[in-house]
């Protein structure tokens, strides 16, 4: 079996000297093969774990001030070196209760470019799977892991801690603490995970409040995001500054239970375009979705007459729709995977159509489009 090496972080000046002297080569530096074997590192961690208290003030690569206290049943593994070690990437695996819900493919690609150019700047945080010793779940660093896989890396720099991967709430809470310190997780993604924990009988909302150190009332209000369909949550996520959890909680109380997705999206559009606050929400709901004895009157967008999905490869990334009330909608999802040159060309075509729509009659519109297309060629 290939021996993985302990990852150290010498200064750039020292690295340059080592390379010039021929003691290491750039390939070694890229792989991080600069120290102990993985087995030696693991044994060192276990041997020195009793020194946790005295070692607490040692300088580490992780800013402990930005990390919330560990769950009660979790203890960091420490040693004389807290830099971690390189591990065979095949021994790492994703965990169902990783705190981050959405991981955009574009983010994975961007990070892969940075890893290829600069190497790995911080370790992924892992914990050993007691049911499969020698394999590890990722608490924080899933994006680094996916990016490294895309680069066909054989090893990844990791730092282990102890947390039970078979206690969903404990694992989630620790993952949230670590991941939030790297890149904050949206409140909608947090709410989705909490609802999943509740639905699968892994936690009550009271237990979640204790684990994530939030007031019970805050957790209850944040769970309001999960009362809406995925398309509605996606719209809220795109305009998150307009949909704080206090407003979303109030919104869920002011719409009829039988309101459909289109009607609720209309209401959400109105909140954004009219800059509605929580105080003005009730009046808006009465105007858009009137709730009274089962009778509803609303300014609704009619059912689509034409609906053409827009796909890039086999993936739906948007759509073109017309409605029988005269509305027209062309939408590309902001996180859609699309070749950048194709996106630029598409925007240019839409600009041509937008300018043509300002003409006074159909003939002038057609002429404008034809002229612009000829210029575009």
Image: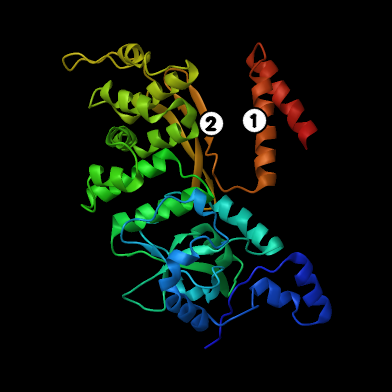
Q: Check disc 1 and report its element: helix, strand or loop.
A: helix
Image quadrant for the C terminus?
Answer: top right
**Horizontal relation, residue 15 to residue 275: left or right:** right
Q: Position of residue 54 (x, y in %)?
A: 47, 66
Q: Earlier in the sequence, mark 1 or mark 2?
A: 2
Res 140 seen here: yes
Q: Position of residue 258 (x, y in %)?
A: 23, 27
Q: Nearer the viewer, residue 366 or 23?
A: 23
Q: Position of residue 229 (x, y in %)?
A: 33, 36
Of all residues shown, which one is farthest toward the bottom? Answer: 1
Which residue: 67% across, 17% down?
363
Which residue: 63% across, 16% down?
362
Number of labels in the image equals: 2
Of all residues shown, which one is farthest toward the left? Answer: 293
Q: Nearer the viewer, residue 296 or 183?
A: 183
Q: Position of residue 231 (x, y in %)?
A: 39, 36
Q: Nearer the viewer, residue 361 or 117?
A: 117
Q: Residues within 10 Å of mark 2 (few under 14, many from 20)?
A: some
Which residue: 47% across, 78% down?
42
Residue 294, placed above or below residue 98: above
Report how far apart the C-alphas of labels 1 and 2 lie in the structure: 10 Å
Mark identifier at residue 293: none
**Horizontal relation, residue 128 to residue 294: left or right:** right
Res 100 seen here: no
The residue that disc 1 covers is 350
Colour convention:
rainbow
Does the CB distance between marks 1 and 2 fall below 8 Å?
yes
Q: Check disc 2 and report its element: helix, strand or loop.
A: strand
The residue that disc 2 covers is 330
- The quadrant in which residue 376 appears is top right
């Amino acid at each position: 079996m290939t021996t993985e090496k302990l990852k150290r972080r010498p200064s750039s000046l020292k690295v340059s000297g080592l390379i010039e002297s021929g003691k290491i080569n750039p390939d070694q530096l890229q792989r991080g093969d600069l120290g102990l074997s993985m087995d030696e590192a693991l044994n060192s961690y276990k041997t020195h774990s009793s020194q946790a208290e005295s070692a607490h003030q040692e300088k580490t690569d992780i800013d402990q001030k930005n990390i919330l206290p560990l769950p009660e049943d979790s203890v960091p593994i420490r040693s004389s070196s807290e830099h971690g070690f390189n591990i065979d990437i095949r021994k790492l695996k994703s965990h169902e209760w990783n705190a981050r819900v959405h991981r955009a493919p574009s983010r994975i690609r961007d990070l892969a470019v940075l890893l290829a150019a600069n190497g790995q700047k911080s370790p992924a945080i892992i914990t050993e799977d007691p049911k499969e010793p020698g394999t590890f779940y990722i608490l924080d660093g899933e994006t680094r892991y996916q990016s490294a896989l895309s680069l066909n890396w054989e090893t990844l720099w990791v730092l282990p801690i102890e947390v039970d991967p078979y206690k969903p709430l404990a694992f989630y809470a620790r993952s949230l603490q670590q991941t939030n310190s790297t890149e904050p997780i949206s409140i909608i993604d947090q709410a989705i995970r909490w609802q999943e924990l509740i639905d699968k009988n892994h936690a009550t909302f009271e237990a979640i409040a204790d684990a994530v150190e939030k007031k019970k009332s805050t957790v209850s209000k944040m769970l309001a995001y999960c009362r809406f369909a995925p398309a509605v949550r996606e719209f809220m996520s795109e305009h998150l500054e307009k949909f704080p959890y206090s407003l979303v909680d109030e919104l869920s109380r002011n719409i009829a239970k039988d309101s459909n997705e289109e009607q609720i999206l209309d209401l959400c559009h109105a909140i954004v375009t009219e800059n509605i606050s929580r105080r003005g929400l009730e009046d808006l709901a009465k105007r858009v979705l009137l709730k009274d004895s089962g009778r509803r009157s609303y300014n609704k967008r009619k059912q689509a007459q034409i609906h053409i999905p827009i796909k890039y490869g086999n993936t739906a990334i948007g759509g073109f729709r017309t409605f029988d009330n005269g509305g027209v909608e062309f939408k590309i999802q902001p996180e859609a995977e699309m070749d950048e040159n194709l996106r630029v060309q598409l925007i240019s075509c839409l600009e041509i159509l937008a300018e043509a729509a300002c003409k006074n009659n159909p003939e002038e519109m057609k002429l404008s489009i034809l002229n612009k297309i000829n210029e575009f060629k």
